[in-house]
Amino acid sequence: MKTKIILLLMISLLLLGCGKIDVEELEKARLEREFAKGIKVPKITGTGEVLTLPDYAMIYVRAGAGGDSEYQAIRRAENRINLVKDFLIESGVKESNIEIEGLKGAYWDTQTTRFVTTPFLSARVDDMENLRTYLDSIVGVFAEVRVEFELTDESQAKANKEAFKLAEEDAKAQGATTAELLFASRNFDVRNGKIRKYPETSYAYSVEKTIEEAKNVDLTPKPTKTTARVAVMETIDPKDIPDYPGN
């Protein structure tokens, strides 16, 4: 037991004698390791874009409310968001396609000096030709409404495949070989068509006037843009990069 204690004391003394860890030396060592193995950078990048008409639309609604107590704020917000839900169902949206979130708590707003909560409703609309009917049904609640056009998983997978095919063709046109493409880096980005606000202008003093303004909003289903990138990488010496740290 005494031997172990003496050994631990010796190790502690040795560590104390080493002084503080030199951060600059550690960073220098890291850079030297990177220099030794080189870094990978894109040599050829192929890009492919595909536009796909949406399969359905999603209506997103926020209907906030405030109160003197957390309970009061939640109850008021619950009444508003449920009113949105009822109007959507009455106008033809399937209840099973509607979800509500964010009714579990409220927060203290220092600007309004009251409790506030903003529940969130989402509703899937497959019959997009009736989208305006559904949106007009909830204008009277004076909530924040936006629309996003989306693809099913199957349609998105098909769009990804087509986009990557175009990206590979683009890379080959730039000189990439079939062998290089086998080990290429791949990524894709999806941007759905959106209507950021319905209606786009500020709400008028009456529901009728607001609906009249909303007629100017183009509700034509907007396509989803899928962008794929295929990058053939090459390893280079960091010393060949003038601005690289350590040079």
Image (spheres, rainbow, N blue to C red):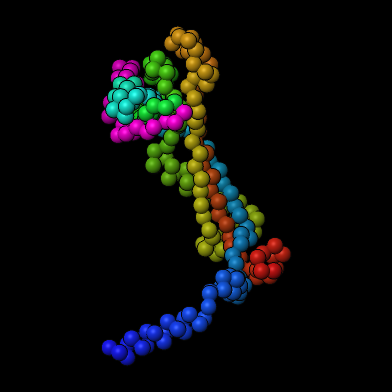
**Which residue: 51% across, 62% down?**
182
Report the quarter where the C terminus lies: bottom right
**Which residue: 65% across, 65% down?**
245
In the figure, 158 relative to 195: above or below?
A: below
Q: Is 25 or 148 nearer to us in this picture?
A: 25
Q: Is 193 or 44 nearer to us in this picture?
A: 193
Q: Position of residue 178 (x, y in %)?
A: 56, 61
Q: Residue lying furthest right in this view?
A: 242
Q: Is 139 or 174 nearer to us in this picture?
A: 139
Q: Position of residue 168 (x, y in %)?
A: 56, 53
Left or right: residue 104 versus residue 189 is left
Magenta region includes residue 108: yes
Q: Which residues are magenta?
A: 83-111
Q: Residue lying furthest bottom in this view?
A: 3
Q: Position of residue 93 (x, y in %)?
A: 32, 23
In the figure, 31 relative to 113: above or below?
A: below
Q: Position of residue 133 (x, y in %)?
A: 40, 17
Q: Is 73 or 243 nearer to us in this picture?
A: 73
User: Residue 98: in sight, yes or no?
Assistant: no
**Which residue: 53% across, 19% down?**
201
User: Residue 246: in sight, yes or no?
Assistant: yes
**Which residue: 57% across, 73% down?**
22
